[in-house]
Image (cartoon, grey):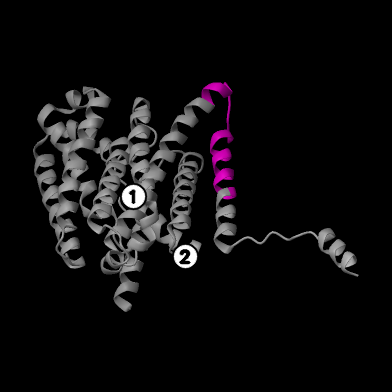
Amino acid sequence: MSLEIASRAVARPRSIVLSPPLKRMLILGVLTAIVVVLFMTLNVRGNWGFVLRFRGTKLAAMALVAYAIAVSTVLFQTASNNRILSPSIMGFDALYVLIQTGLVFALGAQRAVAVHPQVRFLAEVFIMVAFAGLLYRWLFDKSRRSLHLLILVGIIFGVLFRSATSMMQRMIDPNDFSVLQDLLFASFNSFDRQLLLISALLIGGASLAAWRIGHTFDVLALGRETAVNLGVDYQRTVSIILVVVTIMVSVSTALVGPVTFFGLLVANLAYLLIGTHRHRWVLPCAVALSLLFLIGGQLIVERLFSFNTSLSIIVEFFGGIVFIVLLIRGIAR
C-alpha cells in the first residue's frame, strides 16, 4: 500500500507556484521585450546593419537613462523616507539649464557647441555632483531635518537658478537663444554617441556601490529611528546612497537633458504594480517600467508623430499629473 502511494506521489507532477510580484515582473519583462523588438525592427528599409547599429545606439542611451533615473529615484525616496520626492525636484534640472545658458552666454552659441563633448559632459557632471552632494549632505546630516525644509530648500535653489537663467537668456543674442533652446530639452536623437561608454562606467560604478549596501534598503525605508535601532549605520548608508543618486542623475541629465517627473512616475507606479515595498522587487520593476515607457514613448514619437513632438514633453505631462495626484492623496490623508 505504501509503495502504491509513493508511486502516485512520484508520478504526480508538481505545479510551479509563482508569487504575484514574480508574475507581474514576467509580464512586464515580456512587454518590454516586445517594445524593444518593435523599436529595433519596425519600418526598417535599406541596410539592416546600419539601421540596427543606429537604433541600437539610441536603445543603449535610453537603457542607461531609464536605469539611472529609476534606481536613483527609488533610492532617494528610500533615503528621504518619502515617495513624493525625486532628485530632479531638488533643483537638478534648473542647474542643468543654468549651466547650458551660462556657457552660451559666456562663449556664444558657436563656441559653446564647439566645446569637446567629453570635456563638456564631465564638467556638467562634476558641477551637478558637487552641488547635489553639498545640498543633500546638509539636508541629511546628524540633525533631524523636516520634510518641509527639504522641499523649501529645493524650491529656493530652483528659483535662484531659474532667475539667474532668465536674466542671462534676456541678454543673449536671439540667434544664440534659438540654439540654446535645442540644448534644454531631453533628446535621444542628438546626444553624442562617444559619451555612452563614459556614462556606462560612471553608472556602473555607482551601481556597484549601491549593490554592496543593498541589504540595508528595506530597513532604511522603515525610517531613521527604526533603522538605527536595528543596527544600520544610518549616516554612512545615507551618504553612500546620496553619492549614488547624484552620480546617476547627473550622468543621465548631462547625457540627454533633464526629465523632471519621469523618475517620480516610474517609482510610484512600481510600488503600486509590484504590491510590496521590498527593494529586490521594486528596483527591477521600476527599471522595467522606465525602459517600457522610454522606448515605447520614443517609438510612438518616431512612428506615430513623425518627430513632430518631443518625448520629454509627453513624459513631463504624465509625470506632472502623477505628482499632482500624489500631493492630493497626501493632503487627503
Which residue shows up at 32% across the image and 47% down it? 259
Q: Quadrant of the N terminus?
A: bottom right
* Pointer 1 residue: 72
Residue 58 horizontal/vertical position (percent): 44, 33
Q: Specify the quadrant that holds the C terminus.
A: bottom left
Q: Is residue 33 magenta?
A: yes
Q: Looking at the image, is 132 positioned above or below residue 277? A: above
Nearest the viewer among 247 and 323 is 247
Q: Amino acid at mark 1?
A: Ser
The kind of secondary structure the magenta stretch mainly shows is helix
Q: Residue at x 40, y 61 (%)?
A: 268
Three-letter amino acid code at disc 2?
A: Thr
Label 2 packing within 10 angstroms: few (<14), some (14-19), many (20+) = some
Query: Where residue 198 sits in the image (x, y, percent)?
Result: 33, 29
- Residue at the bottom extreme of this rendering: 333
Magenta extent: 30-51
Please tell me which residue lies in front, 59 or 142: 142
Quadrant of residue 67 within the rendered picture: top left
* SS type, badge 1: helix
Label 2 sits on residue: 276
Point out the tag, 2 or 1, that comes first from the N-terminus: 1
